[in-house]
Image (cartoon, rainbow, N blue to C red):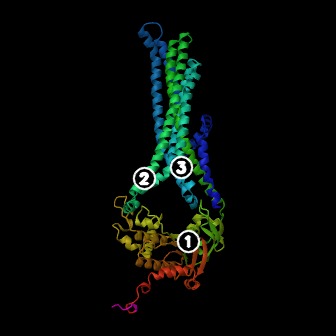
């Protein structure tokens, strides 16, 4: 099941490279679909602003053509025979029309630009929320897949930026098309032979722009993983969490060398692509110059042969200049649309695959989830589950079976890498096993909506998040702490976990912001954060509590106290507890202990059963106990040999 979900991102590179190899014709065929996707985004964001932008840009284009044709009447009147005052008076009405056309066009353009500026942030909000909705819904195992990380990196960075830029590009493209149409219409009226020559001048620029965009995208595509590693190195060198260790281990030169190697590679790639893009643009400019020379030569021949009046030729020159500028705008808009469209396709590909995966997962779930009485379970059973992380050759869990009866405290022990945390995450509904199932009584919860399951599970994790929120929000995690009942529950959870002592020492108590990056923010020690994480788990009204190394950052006294509080809290609230810890003295009183070794359950029973068995648990327990047996290493004075 997991393998099928994670195999899809591997095709994303193939799709990206296919798009990067497209030629101008292919790009032109794909353009309408791309514009349609952008149009739907704009329509969803604000249909009024979208309509105003499109309509008023089109009207501005119409008045551009009208102004050019009115210019012909002005020039005809000015070049006519007769006294100059009479010619000026004859040209005055046409001049008024030209001025009116310019004014209306400017007003329409200004209104369209205002609506376009309003539309962009609204589109940004939609694409960002859609991405975050997908990333917070996909299976947790996706984040263990390197190819997924690269695809998400592309979608989150250039993809998000290009999604909002595509709105501007699409509008600019439409505006340029209207401008070209206006100039072409005017030229077609003045002399049809000039029209194809005008289009010919744009082809070299269009070819150069498309090729340049393709070269740039291929370069960026090749740098995705390198840039991701560079940003990780940047975080290591600039982040507060790593600052002390960077200095303690004098690792600064090593980090700078590592970053320098990556930066040099990026520089070499970008310098090489800059050279190729410059050469491409040079060819395009030369060819465009030749095409423009041909256009003006034809215009001169028409004027020389008397096939075009001087006034019309003057207007044609204006139309050609306007048309060429519009064509250049069109080509540049096409270039930006194509280039951003490649990155926008990365965003759309990621969103599509993520949403389809989430949809398939929901379709595979049981439909009658609302009435499933999970909270009243009698037993949680894990039956013959196997799980393999993405990209790993060997399973992290192999044919594992575990039983947790209601109200029991069950412990998972084993050496590092034995699969304890993986099993806990499967029980928490975070991973889906490849084989086997997890059941709450007779309900196979691997076929339930994970959100339904997770509501009845609380987790106290070793690697908990330090949320940049107040102390109360760090415990309530989304509940409105302004509600009196929630506020009381927060205080009870803090008292049960010992976090109340930490919070009472803060300058603003429960309302203290726990992040030193903000004004008046406070930072906690590792042990203090651990207590807050325990309060977070205690606060959640759930019958099943998972504690994964909940005392890793605590001293001996605080550790003993927290384990006592976990047992007391579980007994008081009737909770079932799964306890994962390396401190085996704390699991002696567990109802049952499961020992994992290389992803398999090799022993299970009570503490006395496992000590009598003499297996791995007994070895680990005896090893830890010997550290506290002072007589083994330091015999009593009576036992020491006499000295002279």
User: Alpha-carbon neighbours of circle 1 within 10 Å: few (<14), some, or many (≥20)?
Assistant: many
Task: Give the mark nearer the N terminus: 1 vs 2.
Answer: 2
Q: Which of 302/393 is in front?
A: 393
Instruction: Kindly identify the residue that appears in the image at 45 percent across and 50 percent down.
Output: 261
Location of residue 69 with respect to 518 vertically, above or below? above
Q: Residues within 10 Å of mark 2 (few under 14, many from 20)?
A: few
**Location of residue 37 (image quadrant):** top right
- Is residue 551 visible to the viewer in this orientation of the structure? yes
Residue extending farthest front: 644
Extent of the magenta region? 639-644
Instruction: For label 3, count other residues whose C-alpha is less than 10 Å away and answer few (under 14), some (14-19) or many (20+).
Output: many
**Residue 362: quadrant of the picture:** bottom right
Give the percent coordinates (x, y) of residue 258: 44, 53
Q: Secondary structure at mark 2?
A: helix
Q: Earlier in the sequence, mark 3 or mark 1?
A: 3
Tell me if label 3 and label 2 are in contact, CB under 8 Å: no
Please provide percent x and percent y for residue 347: 55, 48
Residue tagged 3:
155
Residue 165 lies, in percent from the top left, at 50, 42
491 left or right of 291 in image:
left
In the rendered image of this protein, does residue 547 appear above or below residue 226? below
**Label 2 belongs to which residue?**
257
How many labels were placed on the picture? Answer: 3
Find disc 1 in the rendering and name its residue.
420
Q: Which numbered disc, 3 or 2, marks the residue that appears first in the sequence?
A: 3
Distance between the alpha carbons at the discs numbered 3 and 1: 33 Å
Residue 153 sits above or below residue 427 on the image: above
For marks 1 and 2, give the one nearer the viewer: 2
Helix, strand or loop at label 3? It is helix
């Amino acid at each position: 099941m997991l393998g099928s979900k994670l195999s899809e991102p591997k095709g994303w590179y193939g799709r990206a490279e296919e798009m990067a190899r497209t030629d101008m014709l292919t790009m032109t065929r794909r353009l309408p679909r791309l514009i349609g996707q952008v149009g739907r985004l704009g329509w969803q964001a604000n249909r009024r602003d979208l309509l105003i932008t499109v309509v008023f840009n089109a009207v501005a284009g119409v008045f551009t053509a009208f102004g050019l044709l009115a210019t012909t009447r002005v020039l005809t009147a000015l070049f006519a025979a007769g006294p100059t005052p009479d010619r000026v008076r004859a040209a005055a009405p046409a001049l008024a029309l030209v001025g009116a056309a310019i004014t209306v066009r400017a007003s329409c353009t200004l209104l369209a630009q205002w609506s376009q500026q309003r539309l962009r942030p609204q589109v940004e909000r939609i694409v960002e929320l859609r991405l975050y909705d997908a990333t917070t819904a996909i299976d947790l195992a996706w984040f263990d897949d390197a190819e997924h990380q690269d695809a998400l990196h592309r979608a989150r960075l250039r993809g998000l930026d290009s999604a909002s830029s595509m709105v501007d590009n699409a509008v600019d493209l439409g505006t340029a098309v209207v401008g070209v149409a206006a100039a072409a219409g005017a030229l077609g009226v003045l002399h049809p032979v000039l029209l194809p020559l005008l289009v010919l001048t744009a082809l070299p620029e269009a070819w150069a722009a498309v090729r340049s965009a393709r070269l740039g995208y291929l370069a960026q595509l090749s740098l995705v993983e390198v840039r991701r590693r560079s940003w990780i190195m940047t975080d290591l060198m600039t982040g507060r969490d790593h600052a002390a260790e960077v200095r303690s281990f004098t690792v600064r030169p090593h980090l700078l060398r590592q970053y320098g190697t990556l930066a040099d590679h990026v520089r070499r790639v970008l310098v090489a692509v800059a050279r190729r893009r410059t050469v491409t643009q040079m060819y395009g400019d030369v060819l465009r110059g030749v095409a423009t020379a041909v256009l003006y030569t034809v215009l001169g021949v028409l004027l020389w042969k008397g096939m075009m009046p001087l006034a019309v030729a003057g207007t044609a020159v204006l139309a050609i200049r306007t048309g060429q500028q519009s064509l250049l705008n069109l080509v540049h808009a096409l270039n930006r649309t194509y280039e951003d469209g490649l990155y926008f396709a990365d965003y759309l590909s990621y969103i599509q695959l993520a949403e389809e995966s989430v949809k398939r997962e929901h379709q595979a779930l049981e439909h009658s989830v609302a009435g499933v009485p999970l909270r009243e379970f009698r037993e949680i059973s894990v039956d013959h589950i196997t799980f393999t992380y993405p990209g790993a050759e060997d399973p992290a869990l192999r044919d594992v079976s575990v039983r947790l009866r209601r109200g029991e405290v069950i412990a998972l022990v084993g050496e590092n890498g034995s699969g304890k945390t993986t099993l806990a995450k499967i029980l928490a509904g975070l991973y889906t096993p490849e084989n086997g199932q997890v059941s709450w009584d007779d309900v196979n919860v691997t076929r339930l909506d994970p959100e339904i399951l997770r509501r009845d599970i609380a987790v106290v994790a070793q690697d908990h998040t330090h949320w940049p929120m107040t102390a109360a929000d760090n415990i309530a995690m989304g509940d409105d702490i302004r509600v009196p009942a929630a506020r009381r529950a927060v205080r009870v959870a803090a008292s049960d976990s010992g976090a109340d002592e930490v919070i009472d020492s803060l300058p603003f108590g429960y309302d203290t912001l726990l992040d030193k990056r903000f004004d008046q923010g406070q930072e906690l020690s590792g042990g203090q954060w651990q207590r807050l994480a325990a309060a977070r788990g205690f606060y959640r009204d759930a019958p099943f509590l998972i504690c994964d190394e909940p005392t890793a950052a605590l001293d001996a006294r605080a550790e003993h106290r927290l384990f006592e509080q976990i047992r007391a809290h579980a007994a008081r609230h009737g909770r079932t507890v799964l306890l994962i810890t390396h401190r085996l003295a704390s699991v002696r009183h567990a109802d049952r202990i499961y020992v994992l070794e290389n992803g398999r359950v090799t022993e299970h029973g009570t503490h006395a059963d496992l000590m009598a068995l003499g297996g791995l648990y007994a070895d680990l327990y005896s090893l830890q106990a010997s550290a506290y047996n002072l007589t083994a290493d330091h015999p009593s004075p009576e036992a020491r040999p006499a000295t002279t």
